[in-house]
Amino acid sequence: MASRWQGPALVVLRTLVGWHFLYEGYYKLALPGWSPAGAPLPAWSAAGYLRAATGPFAAGFHALAGSAAAQWIDVAIPIALIAIGLSLILGLFTTRGCQGAALLLALFYVAAIPFDGVPQAGVEGTYLIVNKTLIELAAVVVLLTSRTGTIAGLDLLRQRNVKA
Amino acid sequence: MHLTPEEQATGRRNFLRAIAGVPVVAGLGAAALARGPITGGPVRVGYIGVGGEGRVLLGGTDPAYARVVAMADINPAQLALADAVLEKGGHTTKAVHYAEWREMIQKESLEGVVIATPLWSHADIVVGCLEAGLHVLCEKMMAWDVAGAERMRATARRTRKILEIGYQRNYNAVYQAAWEGIVKAGVLGDVFLARLAWHRNGNWRRHGEPPAANYDPSAWGYPTWEHLLNWRLYKKYSRGLLAELASHQVNISNWFFGAEPEAVIGTGGIYRFKDGREVDDHIYATFEYPGGRSAVFSTVESNAFERNYEIFYGTKATLLLQGESEAYLFDEATAPGTPAAVAPTGVTVQPKGAGPALTASESRAADAAGRAATSGGATVNADRLAAYKAEVSGFCSAVRAGTPLLCGPDRAIGSAIACITAVEAVAQKARLPIPPPVAQS
């Protein structure tokens, strides 16, 4: 039987995941810029991530990096991240937001599955198969199956309007 | 300062041991309260004066930090040379050319300017740019006279714009490590004497053709091409070797002593090159600091055996910083000359090498070797040029991210006043008190 804190805890989890998505998207759009320590930060591009992809789908990601679609990916990813972030924070179209989040996280995960089990350059921690991207994906699946939009969020207003 | 190989090895080892664990002061590390990226691309800068020194700074301008929108110089030949430096530095956009700096800052959308013009023009240009709302990186020395330096400092304060003075040693990792790991840490003990030497063997006079046969720089205050080409040799434009060389080193003794000199004793004259120049070719000056400390400066244009260095003699150890790239630390117990440190073979004579006889632009061996300073060259020079690059990048970071700078007007004015006073002391062969900077509220 679920505790009475389950609902609020799920909403908190949804908000945190939403903030993560929102800031990742904002940061990418904010570039080029400068770090607070005064170092220039170049414009963001998915190309580096795609080129560095490993695992069973690596060839597909590598091809994307060099394709004409690359420039669209650079625009679409930040916008999608922001849209998903707002959806999860506000609890608006929550199911769609969770689906989008799960899709992106799955793509991010399969592009760089940690098979080596040793620390990687530029990545904190040590992972084998399970990394934080996969855990966040699992968290989003939990949110998706919990319909947190019906606990708290603008989806509640939307549903009332539909009923009215 | 010539050391035997054994002395060099010992000194280097001591220095490295002393600074071990000292993080290099990046100059860019700022405790910014704001988090997240600061928006904006490279800082839009204009260059005013792209002669030898200006082009060194231009070569140290990283396109990731700055976009050189425009350049102003009264000599069109310098602008053409500067274009090549920009291209070589990976700048993809061409800078617009101007003869007049005022026209440049009026017409272009700039955030900052880098000024490397003859000394006498610093104050007017810096104040004009600050008043126009621009941040300024101005090549040393700060100004031709104390009034000009004070005007620059007051204007920067009033306009709340950045004014950084280009003493590149402040951005040199060797000096930063020496300060943090040795001087500040008290490794030297009590220091009563510093020696500042800049010895060269050659003529400071430059030779060059005007950009056109009918080129006339009189509109800018230079009655002939010769006056522009050799402005450093004329009192109207220059303060001579004290401004061009000593001010670098006095800036370091001010830094390491944590004080400014109170008086200066000077002598010198035009002893070798009696060719119509107005500034001395041999100068000896002793700067007196509070607490019985002295910095003894000498510069000669008749012998390059000792090259240039700063030595701080402490009761516990001696620190030698040579040529902006070498550092040695000698414990008093094993210092050169003491029985433990004398090489078994006795006197060691070191060849002078095939280096330049005289630096053409005061402070860079790169020019003296006949190369453009931006062309790379020997490893020893690469370290110096890295300091220039850190200086320009630091200026841009300060403009965009508000990070602290290392040689603002409050610091730079100390060496300027000391060296300007020293010019008078040398002329009078006298001891003169050095006035403190005007207190600012």
Image: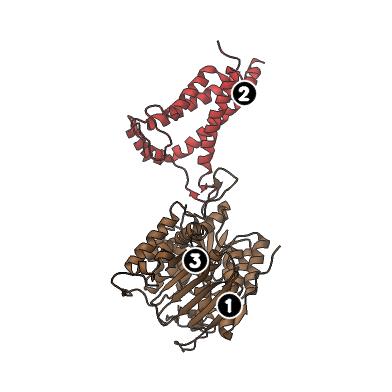
Chain colours: A red, B brown
Is mark 3 in CB contact (under 8 Å) with mark 2? no
Bin the neighbour count of mark 3 within 10 Å (Cα to Cα): few under 14, some 14-19, many 20 and up. Answer: some
What residue lies at 56% left-to-right and 21% top-to-bottom? A10
Bin the neighbour count of mark 1 within 10 Å (Cα to Cα): few under 14, some 14-19, many 20 and up. Answer: many
Q: Secondary structure at mark 2?
A: loop
**Residue carrying label 1:** B264
Please, what is the three-letter code of the amino acid marked with disc 2? Answer: Gly
Disc 3 and disc 2: Cα gap in Å? Answer: 72 Å
Where does the image place residue A114, in percent across and percent down from the top left? Answer: 37, 31
User: Which residue ends up furthest to the front in the rendered image?
Assistant: B339
User: Which residue ends up furthest to the left in the rendered image?
Assistant: B345
Q: Is residue A17 above or below residue A1?
A: below
Please, what is the three-letter code of the amino acid marked with disc 3? Answer: Thr
Disc 1 and disc 3: Cα gap in Å? Answer: 24 Å
**Residue carrying label 2:** A153
Q: For mark 1, name the chain.
A: B
What residue lies at 57% left-to-right and 24% top-to-bottom? A93
Q: For mark 2, name the chain.
A: A
Where does the image place residue A112, in percent across and percent down from the top left? Answer: 38, 32
Q: Secondary structure at mark 1?
A: strand
Where does the image place residue B138, in percent across and percent down from the top left? Answer: 55, 66
Please, what is the three-letter code of the amino acid marked with disc 1? Answer: Val
What residue lies at 54% left-to-right and 34% top-to-bottom? A22
Q: Looking at the rendered structure, which numbered label has been put on residue B196?
A: none
Q: Is residue B280 above or below residue B45?
A: below
Is mark 1 in CB contact (under 8 Å) with mark 2? no
For the C terminus of chain A, the image quarter is: top right
Q: For mark 3, name the chain.
A: B
Say whether residue B45 is visible. Answer: yes
**Residue carrying label 3:** B315
Disc 1 and disc 2: Cα gap in Å? Answer: 75 Å
Q: Give B295 or B425, whichever is nearer the viewer.
A: B295
